[in-house]
Image (cartoon, helix red, strand yellow):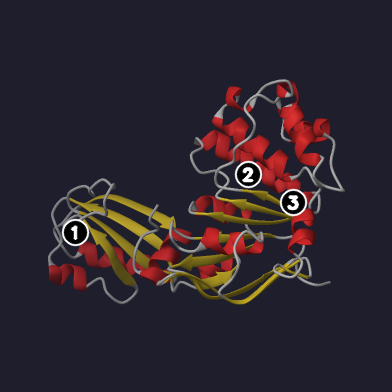
Amino acid sequence: MESAVQVENLVKRFGSLTAVDGVSFSVERGEVFGILGPNGAGKTTTLEIMETLQKPSEGRVRVLGLDVQASAAEVKARIGVQLQASAYYSYLTLKEILSLLGSFYPKRTAPEALLELVDLSDKAASRVGQLSGGQQQRFAVAASLVNDPELMILDEPTTGLDPQARRNLWGLIREVNQRGVTVVLTSHYMEEAEVLCDRLAIMDHGKILALDTPRNLINQLQASYTVKLTMDKPMTATQLSALNGNIELIQSCEQAEPKGKEAMPENTYLLRLANTPSALKAMLDEIAKTDLGLENLQITPVTLEDVFLELTGSELRD
């Protein structure tokens, strides 16, 4: 069966700015495919071309076997889209909005069924402005499903939601996917991408830097753990260099923290540790040779944030 989405050498320019720079990927039918990256990475522009809202400067995009430029109307009839921001008639109820949207398509789903799917049946007679932020996002998902699409495209669907509302929406996205709908979404939340996506493209400055399953992306790092050490005394440059080999210094209390982040506690060091049985013991043995005094030790597996840091040399910016 042909892929749900095929993107080949996609380029999009806005004057002198190249927003998407030679991007290629495919999305298999039935999967949840994510594009992870900061604002300005080119994620939304890529989706807008898939949705037929923008024309590519170069390259080719096929959605559900159709060229998005030659068959735009048919593509629109078979996909569902949730944009970063949605606007609805403020004087219509939720049920009336879904009925209106459904009237634009030859194939449609009953408003009652959609509201039940997103757990808003009791709000059928309410207006969008009367809903909470999480309820509004769930309603936007319902609106994107009004034409019973084969492919649903979600552009940063959980931005601005509190953690509980975000997790509720994750459950809804998984349920929609389990009904056979292919899902393409963008995000700048690491945890969201790791939880939801079968495969994931990491994008920055208009280019795809890596594409694989979240687990395979993480496993590509030579180091598999991060270690946070807090000492009684600061480490000297010589003592830090003695830890080299299986260990890489990522951040120390002496270095400036990224804007918006709290400074690390005094005498605290963040290290990346290789996945070898002897690595942790070697590190602790080196520390034991000193008079620094180990106050605290925290070990955590590496995450997609570590992958992004490795690929770009910087943390994922909002």
Residue 10 sits in quarter: bottom right
| Residue 120 on image: x %, y % | 71, 28
Marks 2 and 3 sit apart, C-alpha to C-alpha, by 11 Å
Nearest the eye: 48 or 32: 48
How many C-alpha atoms fall within 10 Å of the one at disc 3: few (<14), some, or many (≥20)?
some
User: What residue is pinned by disc 2?
Assistant: 170
Q: Residue at x 54, y 58 (%)?
A: 44
Disc 3 marks a residue whose amino acid type is Asn
Q: Residue at x 58, y 25 (%)?
A: 129
Is residue 303 at all visible to an observer of this figure?
no
User: What residue is pinned by disc 3?
Assistant: 177
User: What residue is pinned by disc 1?
Assistant: 255
Counting residues from the start of the chain, the first of labels 2 and 3 encountered is: 2
Relative to residue 99, is residue 149 depicted above or below?
below
Q: In the rendered structure, are the residues bearing label 2 and label 3 in contact, judged by CB atoms less than 8 Å apart?
A: no
> Which quadrant of the figure contains the N terminus?
bottom right
| Residue 18 on image: x %, y % | 45, 71
Task: Judge from the rendering whether residue 152 lies leftward or rightward of residue 108; answer left or right.
Answer: left
Q: Residue at x 43, y 70 (%)?
A: 15
Mark 3 against mark 1, which lies toward the viewer? 3
Counting residues from the start of the chain, the first of labels 3 and 1 encountered is: 3
| Residue 130 on image: x %, y % | 60, 22
Q: Residue at x 55, y 50 (%)?
A: 156
